[in-house]
Image: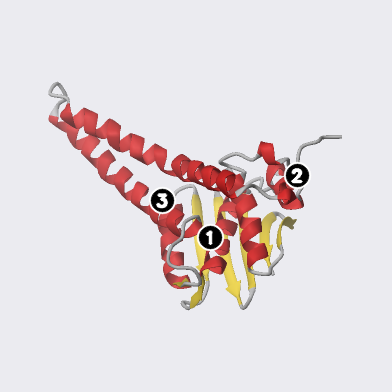
């Protein structure tokens, strides 16, 4: 029998903060790196005008992507206001759509434009991330908020519930196995608990359904 503590024993505040910071860095490192590469090309005196213009377009696109990811992470993982603050669910949807983009995954946001407790909004955004993890080949994620029931449905080719996430939600994954990727569903589970809700991720027909109620 393992003598390591399971996830339900809870991470220390320091470990949780460190892993969430790693998650944010993981999300923004790619566009920030692309900006740096683009600027290097622009500054290279041997590059022709056409290449520099292409590099400038890359910098513009990557800067937009980085800004969208940072705005999303600020709400999904950060403080985003004082304790007990309310966040506009409609605004959160706009930020989520900018984060997802319109390439591999499409997002449909079905939530009323109303102020909600910060923890609830953070939970919904984290549920969206979990749903996206269920369709690695891309597809459609539909987020729905109806009263105190939140769902994120993912439809796509070979949609499935990732085993590592199932382990985190079931409380069978060891704390030492949590990394920048798995800390996200762990955090979502803690958010659900703080809101007095139960979080589950299961197959619903051919779709992945993440539900908190």
- Please state the horizontal and vertical placement of residue 137, each as a whole percent of the image: 57, 43
1 or 2: mark nearer the eye = 2
Could you say which is closer to the camera, residue 186 or residue 206?
Answer: 186
Q: Is residue 27 above or below residue 146?
A: above
Judge from the rendering whether residue 167 lies leftward or rightward of residue 69; answer left or right. right
Q: Quadrant of the N terminus?
A: top right
SS state under label 1: helix
Judge from the rendering whether residue 65 lies leftward or rightward of residue 106; answer left or right. left
- Please state the horizontal and vertical placement of residue 92, each as a whole percent of the image: 45, 66
Mark 3–mark 1 Cα distance, whole angstroms, equals 12 Å
Residue that protrudes farthest toward the right in the picture:
1
Classify mark 3: residues with Cα within 10 Å, few (<14), some (14-19) or many (20+). Answer: many
SS state under label 2: loop
Task: Give the residue at mark 3.
Answer: 69
Judge from the rendering whether residue 163 lies leftward or rightward of residue 51; answer left or right. right
Mark 3–mark 2 Cα distance, whole angstroms, equals 31 Å
First in residue order: circle 3 vs circle 1: 3
First in residue order: circle 3 vs circle 2: 2
> In the image, what residue occupies the spot 26% across and 33% down?
38
Task: Give the residue at mark 2.
Answer: 6
Dots 3, 1 in contact, CB < 8 A: no
Quadrant in the picture for residue 204: bottom right
Q: Is residue 211 above or below residue 21?
A: below
> In the image, what residue occupies the spot 28% across and 39% down?
58
SS state under label 3: helix
Q: Quadrant of the C terminus?
A: bottom right
Classify mark 1: residues with Cα within 10 Å, few (<14), some (14-19) or many (20+). Answer: many
Task: Give the residue at mark 1.
Answer: 125
- Please state the horizontal and vertical placement of residue 167, each as a whole percent of the image: 74, 45
């Amino acid at each position: 029998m393992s003598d390591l503590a399971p996830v339900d024993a809870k991470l220390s505040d320091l470990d949780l903060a460190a892993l969430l910071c790693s998650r944010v860095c993981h999300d923004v490192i790619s566009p920030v790196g692309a900006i740096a590469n683009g600027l290097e090309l622009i500054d290279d005196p041997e590059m022709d005008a056409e290449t520099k213009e292409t590099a400038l377009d890359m910098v513009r696109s990557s800067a937009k992507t980085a800004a969208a990811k940072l705005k999303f992470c600020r709400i999904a993982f950060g403080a985003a206001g004082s304790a007990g603050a309310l966040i506009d669910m409609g605004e959160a949807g706009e930020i989520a759509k900018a984060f997802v983009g319109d390439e591999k995954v499409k997002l449909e946001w079905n939530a009323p434009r109303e102020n909600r407790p910060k923890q609830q909004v953070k939970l919904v955004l984290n549920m969206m991330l979990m749903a996206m993890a269920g369709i690695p080949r891309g597809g459609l994620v539909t987020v729905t908020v109806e009263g105190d029931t939140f769902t994120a449905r993912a439809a796509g080719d070979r949609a499935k519930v990732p085993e590592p996430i199932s382990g985190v939600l079931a409380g069978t994954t060891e704390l030492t196995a949590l990394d920048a990727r798995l800390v996200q569903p762990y955090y979502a589970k803690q958010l659900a608990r703080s809101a007095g809700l139960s979080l589950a991720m299961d197959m619903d027909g051919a779709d992945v359904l993440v539900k908190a109620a």
